[in-house]
Image: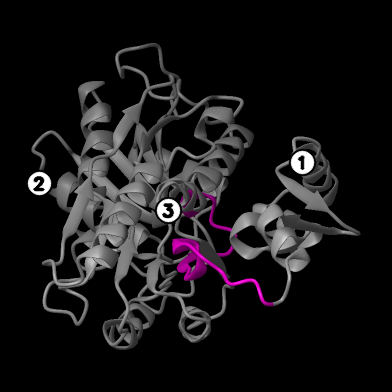
Amino acid sequence: MVRSRGSARVSDLAAELEVSVVTARRDVEELARAGKLRRGHGVARSLDSVARAQAPRSAPSHGAGDAAVALVVPERHTYLYETMHGARTVLDAAGIRVALHITPQATGAERPLVERALADGARGLLIAPRWRTVAEEEAGHAWLAGLDVPTVLMERRPPRGSALHAMDSVCSDHWYGMRLAVDHLVSLGHRRIVLAARDDSPTARALRSAFAGIAGGLEEIEDWSVVLSASSSEAADGAAGPAERQGTGDGGGPVTGEGLARLLREHDFTAAVLHGDVDALMLVQQLADSGVRVPQDCSVVAYDDVVAAFGSTPLTAVAPPKAAVGRVAAELLVQRLSRPGAPPQRTELLPTLQIRGSAQDLASDRSTV
């Protein structure tokens, strides 16, 4: 991050990486000792920026890194930070300087950041828009389609026929990821499954739709339901759609561990898919407080696999290829910069399932939920 910006305040690094200032300062000191950056009073500076500051004013600049590529990801989104790091490895190897832009949570915050980056001379763009609602996503299509620099969408798949249908994009195949989760639970004998998922991003909406289609289409599934897993959704379309209501349906508002435990008891659900990881870990803790044990009383598969392995009960999780999405997107952008007229590409990468023991065979000893 320091290399891409030239300099950064330690407090800003701590906030964006979601660590304490003490941790960020300690890491900056370690990098300074290793000769990878320079420390100042509360500021970290890249060696390149220090060299440029010390060079004679008449010294010309050289190299591909003089014109940056803008990399835009949402604030406090650990999942997409892994994608960001994957992209940077490719761009750094190509000698292309990265200008990182962190999008705040305000609606429409991407556009002014992108316009500023282009005004500063960015010659390409990698972007993962937040798009909390369908309306916000549709509003973003028009201005993104009008950009005059090579642009690759990361973890976003515009609908067919939209203004961005022909824009380069690289994302995870979340339908396949959800199928991995459901098939795993079905293979363990579970026939009554609930999905607790967010609804404040294109990924969350894709997962809800995928689960409804998969669970509703499998003869083995006797009953299913979709509930909202977090209260941070601003989506006006946050309630379950018609396809989701084919199951037990959701209760309208975000579910707590107590509410999820009640749903499990009332409908004899034996398994749950939980999106995302942080919500999953919190719900598992709250289920325990309500007397529901994982996996003895309820088998759980999380979705995202950012922190799922670190719970007191390590969670089996679907792991989208986060870093690979960033790498492939960056490789595609590098190609676009050298061959602007090449046909657009829409690439999907397959998630994997990481089994850790939070889901067990239904035939195992199980208390009444």
Residue beneath label 3, please?
91
Indicate yes or no whether the magenta region holds residue 127: no
- To which quarter of the image does residue 343 belong? bottom left
Q: Which mark is residue 217?
A: 2
Read off the magenta span.
58-80
Residue at 75% over, 67% down: 53
- To which quarter of the image does residue 257 belong? top right
Residue at 36% over, 19% down: 360
Q: Which numbered disc flags the more N-terminal residue, 1 or 3?
A: 1
Residue beneath label 1, please?
27
Q: Which image quarter is the C terminus in?
A: top left
Residue at 16% over, 52% down: 213
Q: Amino acid at mark 2?
A: Gly
Residue 1 shows up from this direction: no
Where does residue 282 sit, x and y in percent of width and height?
59, 43
> Relative to 132, is 290 on the left or the right?
right
Above or below for 294 versus 67: above
Above or below for 228 versus 288: below
Q: Amino acid at mark 1?
A: Asp
Indicate yes or no whether the magenta region holds residue 78: yes
Query: SS for tag 1?
Result: helix
Where does residue 100 sit, x and y in percent of width and height?
55, 64
- Mark 1 vs mark 2, CA separation in Å: 50 Å
